[in-house]
Amino acid sequence: MARTELFVRKQAGGVFSITGVGNHPGDVYLVHSGTGTDGAGYGQNPDAPVATIDYAVGLCAASKGDVIYVMPGHAETLSAAAGIDLDVIGISVIGLGAGNLRPTITATATGSDVDIDAASITIRNLRFVINVASLTALIDVNSAGFTMEDCDFYGNDAADEAPVITVITDATANQMVIRRCSFNYLATLDDTAITATPTECIRLVGANRAIIEDCYFGGDFTTSVINGITTLCTDI
C-alpha cells in the first residue's frame, strides 16, 4: 500500500480516527451547546462534545496545532470581556456547517469580546451577532499571527446594533490576516435598517504586515472602514 499523509490516531478518551497529519498535527476537540457538557471525559467524541469554545481552549496544548471543531447549530452567548479567550498558542477554531447552521456567537454586553491572547491563532467559518447597542470592540487581537477567515458579522434585530469597532489590535498584533469575511452593519439579521454609526470596522494599532483581502464592509462608519491610529503600521 502506498504511503500517504493519512494516519490512525486514538486520542485519549476519544474515538479512533483516520486523519491527515497536515490538517491535524495535534489533538482534536468538538463543541456543541445543545449536546455538550463542559467536564472531564467530554470533547473528544462528536457524540459527547463540550458545550463552550472557551472550555475546549482549556483542553488544548500550546504549539501542537490542536484544532477545535464547533459543530453545526452551536450557539454561544458572549456576555463579558474575554468571554472567549483564545490564549493557547497555535490552535484553530473552525466552525462546521453552512448558512444559518454555522456556529453563532452572540454578544449581549457592551464590553463583551473575544480576546486573541496567544500567537498563531486561527478562527474560521463562525457567525458573530451583536445583540446590544454600542458594543466597544468585538475581536481584540493582542498577539501576532492571527488569522480570521470566512466569518460573518451582523446586528441581531434592532437599529442600534452595530459595534463601535469590530476588530481592534495592539502593537503586538503583527502578521494579522483577515480574509473573506463579511461585516454587515446596514441591516440586521431580521432586516431592520441599522441607524447606528460605528467609528470604524477594523482599527490597526501598530499591526505591521497586516493583510485584509476579499472582505465585504457595509455600514455608516464615521471615521473609516479601516483605520490606522496611534502607532504606525508598516507593510500593510
Image (cartoon, grey):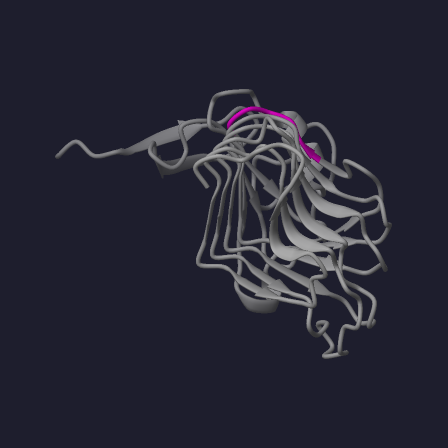
Q: Quadrant of residue 54?
A: top right
Closer to the camera in the image, 51 or 194: 194
Does residue 89 show up magenta in the picture?
yes
Residue that sits furthest to the left in the current view: 2
Decide: is 111 above or below 219. Answer: above
Q: Is residue 41 visible?
A: no
Residue pictured at 57% horizontal, 35% vertical: 44
Q: Position of residue 158 (x, y in %)?
A: 83, 71
Residue pictured at 31% horizontal, 31% vertical: 7
Left or right relative to 222: residue 60: left
Left or right relative to 173: residue 78: right
Q: Position of residue 111 (x, y in %)?
A: 84, 44
Looking at the rendered image, the quarter that the N terminus falls into is: top left
Decide: is 15 above or below 187. Answer: above
Q: Position of residue 11 (x, y in %)?
A: 49, 27
Closer to the camera in the image, 81 or 17: 81
Does residue 126 show up magenta in the picture?
no
Q: How many marks?
A: 0
Decide: is 133 above or below 80. Answer: below
Q: Write the start and end of the magenta stretch as one range.
A: 85-90
Q: Is residue 157 visible?
A: yes
Left or right relative to 189: residue 2: left
Decide: is 140 above or below 107. Answer: above
Q: Position of residue 232 (x, y in %)?
A: 57, 33
Q: Quadrant of residue 154?
A: bottom right
Q: Main secondary structure of the magenta part?
A: loop
Q: Quadrant of residue 129?
A: bottom right
Residue pictured at 70% horizontal, 74% vertical: 187
